[in-house]
Image: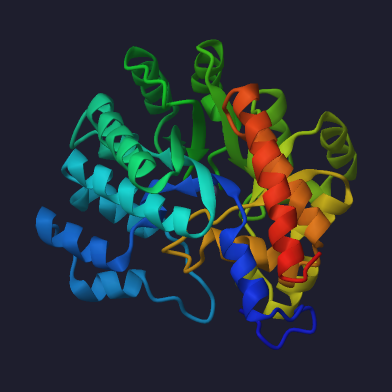
Amino acid sequence: MVPDSPFLKPLTDEQLAFFETFPKAELHCHLLGTISKETFLDLVRESGAPVTEEEVNEFYTRGEKPVGVLRIFRALEAHILKDPVMLTRITIEHCERARSHGVLYTELFWNWTGLKHFYGFEAGQAAIIEGLKIAEERFGIKGRLIPAIDREAPPEDAVELVEEMIAHRAPETIGLGIDYRETLHEPENFWKAFRLAKEAGFGITIHAGEFGEHFRNVETAVELCGADRIDHGYTITDAPELMAEYAKRGIIFSVVPTNSYYLRTFTDEEWAERHPTRAMAKAGLRIYPNSDDPTMHHVTVAESWRLMYQFLDFSIADLRAMIEASIDAAWTTEEEKAAWRAAWLPEFDRQAKACGLA
Ligand SMILES: [Zn+2]
């Protein structure tokens, strides 16, 4: 990406490797956005879905400007992911890859609403948890699950999703998210599902302020829908007072440097200079980078961290603070977070020093 940018900080091979190896958490990643092309082709064959190899090739081709991935997800939901065992497979494969990029803990979004014509929530959830258990045992990565509301579906489907989460409660399922297109699908439409989840003790994270949508969606997510953290949230930069308020309250934003909206609407130069994460951090908001849909956006979580340093002008000390933000934002026990801080931060310092970045 933008190899000749004036914003680029050059890195040695050793320094490039550092971004792959320092310990990190990823809390903003969608399971369907992690499928490799090879596996996608296998799944199409296994399901007998009416999707051609040309279409799959097209899904995985990244042009000059990236296109959205939602069409691919709809094909997976409508025709391909027929058997819960397919969810086990993609979970294991994603966790193995994430671990190879330094991820020790991940929270994964998955949508059931678009899959319910194939199987019940309980079967889908069990299949993914099986994958998480296998991955933890084999690769030493811990994974947790966040069912996500399909905001293009009726709000009643979101309530149904939360009722299923409660009826089939699993310790690995820790929160409720919301994804698909934000435009014309505001967070307040789903207040009932969020309230139900909150009352049942689930964490709440909400995609808001993406696709250039109004900053009030971020405010609504936090103030009305009870979001504990925000996915993206970029348009909060249009509201300096709200930024100051959320900086004061320590609300954490799970950002994505390769978010397709800004790659599409900005030139490469503008992207590096004007990506909203810069203004968010400057206003004191706590942020940390994520891959979102790694295979479909042709990015790894390690690259997301590297882009923050290499192009978006964050320092090594800034990245260290982002690791702390990701730990604080994780939905786990205070004991486990303390253990991660004690282990990950000195290891980050050690590796940064060893490669000459600190
Ligand atoms: Zn996302």
In front here: 191 or 108? 108
Residue 25 % position (x, y): 58, 45
The reply to whether residue 233 is in sight is no
Seen at 56% across and 24% down, the residue is 203
In this picture, residue 36 sits left or right of residue 252:
left
In this picture, residue 332 sits left or right of residue 11:
left
Considering the image in quadrants, where does the N terminus appear? bottom right
The reply to whether residue 256 is in sight is yes
Residue 346 % position (x, y): 72, 48
Quadrant housing residue 264:
bottom right
Looking at the image, residue 202 lies above or below residue 216: above
Seen at 27% across and 29% down, the residue is 126
In this picture, residue 112 sits left or right of residue 107:
left
Looking at the image, residue 120 lies above or below residue 60: above
Seen at 32% across and 48% down, the residue is 92
Quadrant housing residue 206:
top right
In front here: 130 or 246? 130
Residue 334 % position (x, y): 65, 23
Seen at 75% across and 34% down, the residue is 251
